[in-house]
Image (cartoon, rainbow, N blue to C red):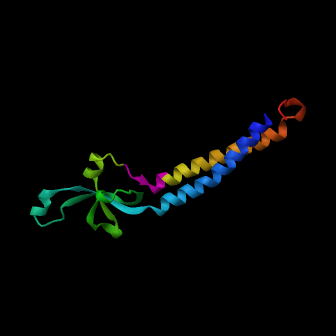
Amino acid sequence: MRIGLVLLGFLGFVGFFATFVLEQTFQSRAKLVQFVHKRPDLLATGQEGYVRVGTPQLMVLDDKQAFLSGFGDQGALLADMEYMSIHKLSPLPISTLQSIAFMARVGALVSVLIAIVGYRTIPRSFVADD
C-alpha cells in the first residue's frame, strides 16, 4: 500500500512539472491567427477576396498551407477555414491549452497530497508490503 502511495506521489510530482514543459513547448509554436472564408465574388468588386471570422487569437496551427498570403488585424496570419475543414485541421487555442494545463496541475497536486496524507496516516503495522 505504501509503495503505491510513493509511486502516486512521484508520478504526481513529475506530472506537475511536465505540464510546464509541455505548455511552454506548445506556446512557442503559437501564432496570431485570423480565420477567413474565401469569397471570390468579392475580388470582382475590388475588395479583399475573403471575409474575416471572429477576432485574431493565439493558436497552434502547424500546416503552412492553411495560411493565405497577407496579414489581418494586428499582424495576424490569415487561416483559410475551407482548407482546414477539408483537411480536418483543428487549431489549438492557447487559452484552451492553458486551461488544460491548469487542470492537469491541480490533478497532479491532488495526487501528491493524497500520497502524503495516505503515507502518513496508514500505520506501518497495517501494511504488509513494507
x%, y% of residue 42? 14, 60
Residue placed most toward the observer, 128 or 94: 128
Q: Is residue 27 left or right of residue 13?
A: left
> Residue lying farthest front?
129
Q: In this view, does 116 lie to the left or right of 41?
A: right
Q: Is residue 23 left or right of residue 106?
A: left
Residue depicted at 59% across the width and 47% down the height:
104
Q: Is residue 66 left or right of residue 92?
A: left
Magenta-drawn segment? 90-96
The N terminus: image quadrant:
top right
Q: Does the magenta segment cover residue 94?
A: yes
Residue depicted at 68% across the width and 45% down the height:
11
x%, y% of residue 43? 13, 62
Q: Image quadrant of residue 111?
A: top right
Q: Image quadrant of residue 69?
A: bottom left
Relative vertical location of residue 106 with respect to residue 62 in this rendering, above or below: above
x%, y% of residue 40? 14, 57
Relative vertical location of residue 106 with respect to residue 46 in this rendering, above or below: above
Relative vertical location of residue 121 with respect to residue 98 in this rendering, above or below: above
The C terminus: image quadrant:
top right
Q: Does the magenta segment cover residue 7?
A: no
> Residue lying farthest bottom?
75
> Residue lying farthest left?
44
Residue depicted at 58% across the width and 51% down the height:
102
x%, y% of residue 105? 62, 50
Give the mark count: 0
